[in-house]
Image (cartoon, helix red, strand yellow):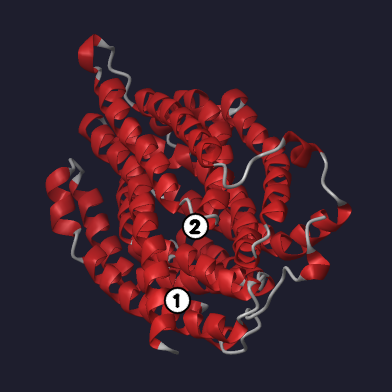
Amino acid sequence: MKFSEDRSFTNKLVSLILPMTLQFFMFALVPLSDTVMLAALDQDAMSAVSLATQAMFVLNLFMFALSAGSSMFAAQYWGKGDKESIEKLFGYVIRLTIPVVFVFFFCALALPEGVMRVYTDVPGIIDEGVPYLRIVSPAYIFMGFTMIYESILKNVGLVKQCTIASTVTVLLNIALNAIFIFGLFGLPVMGASGAALATTISNIAGFGTCLYFSYRYKTVRLKVSNILNTSLEARKLFSKHSAPFLLNQIFWGFGFTMISVILGHLGGDVVAANSIVTVVKDLVSCFCYALGSGGSIVVGNELGAGRLERAREYGARILRLTIVSGIILGLIAAASSPFIVMLLNLTPEAEHYMFIMLLMCSYYIVGRSINATVIAGLFAAGGDTRFGFICDTVTMWAFIVPVGALAAFVFKWPVMAVYFILNLDEIIKLPAVFIHYRKYKWVKNIVDTKEELD
């Protein structure tokens, strides 16, 4: 690779991953603030919010599939210079988003107790989670639309603006968390319900910020005509490459949710410890998520422009970087436990569980970093989504969920042995991921002139 090309790659990747890392970090601060503030009031309230937000996690599975599908095409169309097709894609994905977000809104608003009972049978946790779900339900609508907006805006050069929108959302959420949870400025103490209200208000503000940037910069516009009218060819093209992504998210995501269900039935201390560890995982994984998203855009631009060999070289460099960063991030997670203990008020048993769980994070995050970058980043950039669906589904449903459930409820193994099994999913699929990467099926242009969104 020539020096000028090398420098161009570095500059472009850095310009993407730095704001994206900040964006993912800001998003991870919200559950952290929920955890810290609610733990100061009541451990059950903290655990309830952790489990109640699993509903939002399931919604995110659908939204991530739709936003990743739109990003896959937008990156290649932008590299090709086809703005019109991006706008048609934008409208179609919003059309798909509308029914999804309203289904989750209805379930959280009308059936909150049923949702909570899926994850736990502890009465105190259920009682705290029901009002949380009712109050947070409108946030699902605005969060879903925001994710689609940001997936498009990132691919047309507005990464910094997306980061600003995320920052507004998160800082407002954290500030309102403190006000509503603890009842500052003369307001009543709301606890978990206060966290829900803060989430709803901040997501409305975040969506408004995205709308502002979209219409201020006018890079791409959301047109009503593109929402109402989408050609059969466009639907077929989007479905061809995005359907495996959606199926992957659903099967993997429900498997991941089953992990929470299994842990949720092992006791309140396990739920509390896992709630904290999940936040730590998300915080230290911000860079690898950004690297995967940014790498997908960089590689996708090259693929859309027809520079396949350069895209392949860029992918190799991104993979090397993600391995190194994953090792470093795993060590950081394992070393964080003494600092967390000083911040939170946990029972001795919950602290014990948390220490061991964080040690296990050291290997888990290495695998998560590689898989997030390769499967969701490089493979997706070239429309190679079928492998991820097969790999994740087999791993989760043929091993992790059934073996973990047997260990927990049939063989009655110790809690940490069960947790170890439930955290092997990112590791056991690595050999298959590397073998598939070397086949280079992901080095492909999926938006040639015969497949435009007409």
Residue drawn at x 29%, y 70% as measured from the top left: 330
Q: Which quarter of the figure has residue 353?
A: bottom left
Q: How many marks?
A: 2
Kindly identify the amino acid type of the residue bearing the numbered disc 2: Phe
Pointer 2 local density, CA inside 10 Å: few below 14, some 14–19, many at least 20: few
The quadrant of the picture occupied by the N terminus is bottom left
The local secondary structure at tag 2 comes to helix
**Is residue 324 at least partly visible in the picture?**
yes
Query: In the rendering, at what x and y percent does residue 25 appear?
Result: 33, 51
Dividing the picture into quadrants, the one containing residue 356 is bottom left
Coordinates of residue 258 in the picture (x, y in percent): 54, 54
* Cα–Cα span, label 1 and label 2: 24 Å
Amino acid bearing label 1: Ile
Q: Residue at position x 61%, y 46% from top? A: 220
The extreme top residue here reads 186
Q: On the image, numbered disc 2 is attached to which residue?
A: 409
Query: Where 301 sits versus 273, above or below?
Result: below
Q: Residues within 10 Å of mark 1 (few under 14, many from 20)?
A: some
Return the residue at label 1: 427
On the question of residue 395 being in view, the answer is no
Q: Nearer the viewer, residue 285 or 310?
A: 310
> Residue drawn 51% across and 74% down?
374
Q: Is residue 453 left or right of residue 335?
A: right
Residue 21 placement (x, y as % from top left): 35, 57
